[in-house]
Image: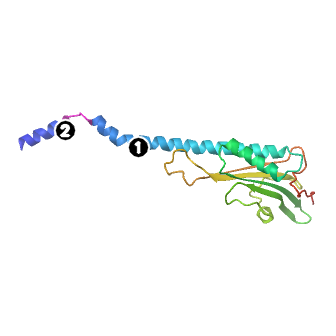
Amino acid sequence: MRALRSLLRRLHRDERGTVAVETVLIAPLLILGLFLSYEAYGLLRQQSLREKATYTVADILSRETAVVTDTYIDNVKRVFDMMSGNSNAQLRISVVRYRRSVSQGIDEFDLRWSEVRGAGTMQPLRDADVRKAHATFPRMTDGEEIIFVESRGPYVSPVSTGHFDATTLRTQMFVIPRFAPQICFTGVCVPATS
């Protein structure tokens, strides 16, 4: 019995091997934390790139004075993909006009046109989608037109821990036309009505 007690005391005082045990216990947590940090950084970086690309697309369209065509929208999508570094996003470009007449009881938005590029579930907006969308659109004056650019797509991480796998990145931007009273699409250029 004395020999057993003596052995247990020596074992209790012996500190050899503690670094190895601590490393085995802590290293997996540190590595997991490193991967999670890298994945979160990639998510925030991709969101930032998409926001900048969305702003650029809106700015390009706001400066347009000619009629916008399908080819033009296709090329804008290519610019968006190149800037965001990712081609798996959808891009929706819509032009919306606000109408307000207190005497006639009109306080609504009219959809001028809406186009979507890229594969996914996003569809062109319909007139019913924007008619009473006061919570979505900024305050506008009667007859004012805005360009509404949205993007949506999955985040694809270079290193996946599974934590951000189902994350969908969304961006949206409003801008008013700068050099023309309205942005016309092929076959759609409706004068303002009050």
Q: Position of residue 16 (x, y in %)?
A: 23, 33
Q: Residue at x 91, y 66 (%)?
A: 104
Residue 152 circle label: none
Q: Main secondary structure of the magenta part?
A: loop
Residue 29 circle label: 1
Mark 2, secondary structure of its residue: helix
**Number of residue marks:** 2
Mark 1, secondary structure of its residue: helix
Q: Residue at x 56, y 41 (%)?
A: 41
Left or right position of 159 against 45: left
Q: Position of residue 154 (x, y in %)?
A: 61, 52
Q: Position of residue 102 (x, y in %)?
A: 89, 62
Amino acid at pointer 2? His
Q: Is residue 121 positioned above or below 160 on the image?
A: below
Q: CA distance from mark 1 to mark 2?
A: 27 Å
In the image, residue 119 lies in the stretch drawn in magenta: no
Quarter of the image that includes the C terminus: bottom right
Amino acid at pointer 1? Leu
Q: Position of residue 156 (x, y in %)?
A: 58, 49
Q: Residue at x 55, y 46 (%)?
A: 157
Quarter of the image that includes the N terminus: top left
- Badge 2 is on which residue? 12
Front in this rendered view, residue 165 or 139: 165
Span shown in magenta: 13-17
Foreground label between 1 and 2: 1
Left or right position of 178 against 151: right
Within-10-Å neighbours for mark 2: few <14, some 14–19, many 20+: few
Left or right position of 157 against 144: left
Front in this rendered view, residue 187 or 52: 187
Front in this rendered view, residue 97 or 91: 91
Mark 1 or 2 closer to N-term?
2
Within-10-Å neighbours for mark 1: few <14, some 14–19, many 20+: few
